[in-house]
Amino acid sequence: MSILNDAGFTYIEALISLSIAAFVMSLMPSILMQFEDAHSPPVDFEIDFFMIDIAETYEESTEVRHDDRTQSIVFTTGKGDVEYRKHGTRIIKSIEQTGYVTVMFDADVFELEETATHVHISVSGEGEGNDETAAFAK
């Protein structure tokens, strides 16, 4: 019968473990410095989501018009009149003038132009490459 005494690490096991830990800790500063200069460019996707939302509303609409009084674009849909307009630096959406939802923050430009056959919209926001234009047939 043998008695096994498992009292812990042997001296050599402790030295090997501490050596590996010291080696890994000495490499960490240089590894972190490699990733320190990696920065993502400032890209804002709100304008993309806004353009998708307004395109979906246009597909559901039966009529499009420019409201000169409120400087807004109005789509007539099965849910009622869906209106997009600029309020401060935000672009807001309302359905039948019952509540407002912000669909885009930090909008610099929200310009509307109406022709005999189309309503043109031009939107720009913060970030690089954030200029969008669209034409909606009446």
Image (tube, rainbow, N blue to C red):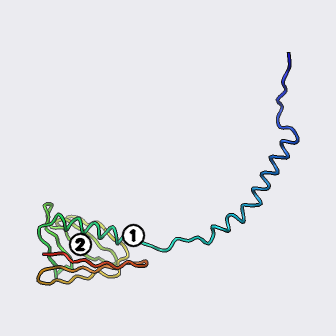
Is 98 in front, or is 112?
A: 112
Residue under pointer 1: 45
Q: Crowding at label 2, few (<14), some or many (≥20) Cα neighbours within 10 Å?
A: many
Mark identifier at residue 84: 2
Q: Quadrant of residue 8?
A: top right
Q: Residue at x 72, y 66 (%)?
A: 30
With 48 as the anchor, is 78 left or right in this view? left
Among numbered discs 2 and 1, the one appearing first in the sequence: 1
Q: From the top left corner, tell me how far across and down residue 134 is, in percent.
A: 25, 77
Q: Residue at x 80, y 46 (%)?
A: 17
5 lies above or below 68: above
71 lies above or below 102: below
Q: Mark 2 touching mark 1, by CB under 8 A?
A: no
129 lies above or below 7: below
With 51 as the anchor, is 64 left or right in this view? left
The residue under label 1 is which amino acid type?
Phe
Q: Residue at x 38, y 76 (%)?
A: 106
Q: Nearer the viewer, mark 2 or mark 1?
A: 1
Image quarter of the N terminus: top right
Q: Crowding at label 1, few (<14), some or many (≥20) Cα neighbours within 10 Å?
A: few
Q: From the top left corner, tell me how far across and down residue 16 is, in percent.
A: 83, 46
The residue under label 2 is which amino acid type?
Tyr
Q: Quadrant of residue 85?
A: bottom left
Q: From the top left corner, tell me how far across and down residue 38 is, in percent.
A: 58, 70
Residue projecting furthest to the top: 1
